[in-house]
Image (spheres, rainbow, N blue to C red):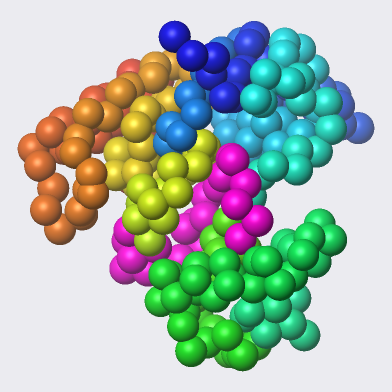
Amino acid sequence: MSEPYIRLHNVGKTYQTKNGTIDACSDINLDIKDSEFVAIVGPSGCGKTTIMKMVAGLQPYTSGTITVGGKKVEAPQTDVGVVFQEAIMLDWRDVFENVMLQVDIRKMDRSKYEPVARDLLERTGLAGFEKKKPYELSGGMRQRVSICRALVHNPKMLLMDEPFGALDALTREQISMDIQRLWMETRKTALHITHSIPEAVLLADRVVVMGPRPGRIVEVIEIDLPRPRRLDQLSPKFGEYSTQIRNIFKSKGVLAMD
Ligand code: ADP
């Protein structure tokens, strides 16, 4: 069997605060294969964001080991694209230049990546919006720009932290479809954090179900559904996976997961 691309081995994180220590997560063991799409679903505060930040090298871990591409994570990763809940954009840059920000920060060759940025914008329905400023866009469009920016430098790994959290239901569905399509075209190794069960089942090859704080992995469920998956053509199996995950949460005393 080939080595996993991302490996978390006995990983734990304790935050030191002025009011004492907070155990965000513990005993996290997870292998993510190259080109696999893994979703982590769990209640608020179970350490999902912490795990993503540790994988990205943005937050040190307290115990265990994380490796990406066989190398121990000890500093911010570079071969990565990250999408956060809020689309963080520079108001004085237009849409195109906000995507190119990734290239500028990394001091990469603009001429090489400009066609990539244009292509990504087109593939996410933003052709014609290149010259718009962020404040002229809807929330969904801003998040699409963030996704383009996360992919423009062709990273191996795509990390997404509740990327649809701030969006209305319809826009969430549309952007889920965009993410699925882009992932099918690029096959990035993807880690997607969410508290939405249907979103996790829709997008992931495997869903990691976490229990309440201190977050631990309760179960990892393989989603054996053909792609592309469509929310308007759900199979009974989709419902069964969702029910299975909801029942795990119920058994852990977590009730309100959509
Ligand atoms: P989730 O993404 O599942 O909502 P987080 O990883 O954001 O969970 O947080 C897990 C726990 O760690 C929460 O109790 C949160 O308050 C705490 N926490 C997160 N970041 C910090 C920090 N920088 N300092 C102190 N505590 C933190």
Q: Give the residue displayed 76% in from the left and 12% down from the top.
A: 63
User: Is 34 rendered above or below residue 199?
Assistant: above
Highlighted range, magenta: 152-177
Answer with left or right where residue 169 lies relative to residue 236: right
Quick one: 62 or 233, which is closer to the camera?
A: 233
Compared with 9, 132 (above or below) is below
Residue at the image point whose x is 73% and y is 62% from the top? 102
Give the position of the C terminus as an image quadrant.
top left
Q: Position of residue 88 (x, y in %)?
A: 68, 66
Residue 9 in view in this figure = yes
Q: How many marks?
A: 0
Above or below, comparing residue 248 to residue 114 in the picture? above
Counting from the top left corner in percent of width and height, residue 129 is at 52, 87
x, y percent for residue 103? 74, 63
Does the magenta run of residues contain 154?
yes
Magenta stretch encompasses residue 34: no
Foreground residue among 34 and 18 = 34
Observer-nearest of 163 and 190: 190
